[in-house]
Image: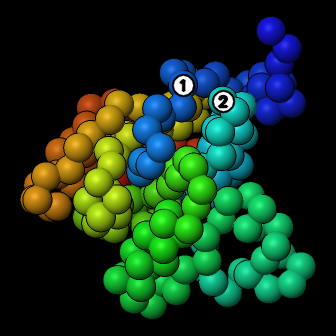
Amino acid sequence: MKQSTYQKIMKLIGWKAVGGPAPEQRCVILGVPHTSIADFFVAYIFYRSLGHKAHIMIKKEFFFWPVGPLLRGLGCIPVDRSNGATVVRSVISAAEESKGEFHICIAPEGTRKPVRKWKMGYHMLARALNCPVYLGYFDWKRKEITIGEPFWCTENARGDTDKIQKHYEDLHLTAKYPEKFLTH
């Protein structure tokens, strides 16, 4: 089997893909821990190496010429972060407009700074799209990346988020900047 360019890049940068892409047409993939912009590049190369394209949210201010068209081509969705409900509506709209597969990657921490209470927008999206949440991660120590296992959200967003944070705590992941990653 011929290696794709993205598979070659993964090998070149020393990262190992664990598992494959999500089989569902629509899903939410958590990217944890998110402590560096480098996480985006590793995750992008990983998912492309699997032959798939995942979407991410980026604040709308970055979508100016000539950067905007490039970001859209990479699967980025412009969002107005001043209102959480607007962010969710923007992503749901993008999912509805997409033809075929729509996998959205989200950092539940909501920032690259350390936070104890993760945001729950991923939960609203998964419930609205009626899709699973994959507990994806990148481990900078082992240089492993995966979409992880599926998790179906219940009606209890805070309870689900607490369970998910505990799951990540039990994985003992190493972030690019470990001091910026908290699970509780």
Kindly indicate whether the residue at mark 2 contacts the one at mark 1 (C-beta within 8 angstroms).
yes
Per the image, label 2 sits on a secondary structure element best described as loop
Left or right of 36 on screen, residue 155: left
> In the figure, 154 relative to 91: above or below?
above
Left or right of 91 on screen, residue 1: right
Question: Residue placed farthest to the top in the image?
Answer: 1
Looking at the picture, how far across and down is residue 118, in whole percent?
30, 62
Which numbered disc, 1 or 2, marks the residue that appears first in the sequence?
Answer: 1
Residue at image location 51% in from the left, 50% down from the top: 103
- Residue 6 placement: quadrant: top right
Residue at image location 32% in from the left, 35% down from the top: 150
> In the figure, 78 relative to 25: above or below?
below
Depth check: give the residue in front, 63 or 158: 63
Looking at the picture, how far across and down is residue 92, in whole percent?
43, 70
Residue picked out by circle 1: 20
Disc number at residue 50?
2
User: Mark 1 to mark 2: distance in Å?
Assistant: 7 Å
- Amino acid type of disc 2? Leu
> In the figure, 111 relative to 63: above or below?
above
- Residue 126 placement: quadrant: bottom left
> In the figure, 90 relative to 83: above or below?
above
Per the image, label 1 sits on a secondary structure element best described as loop
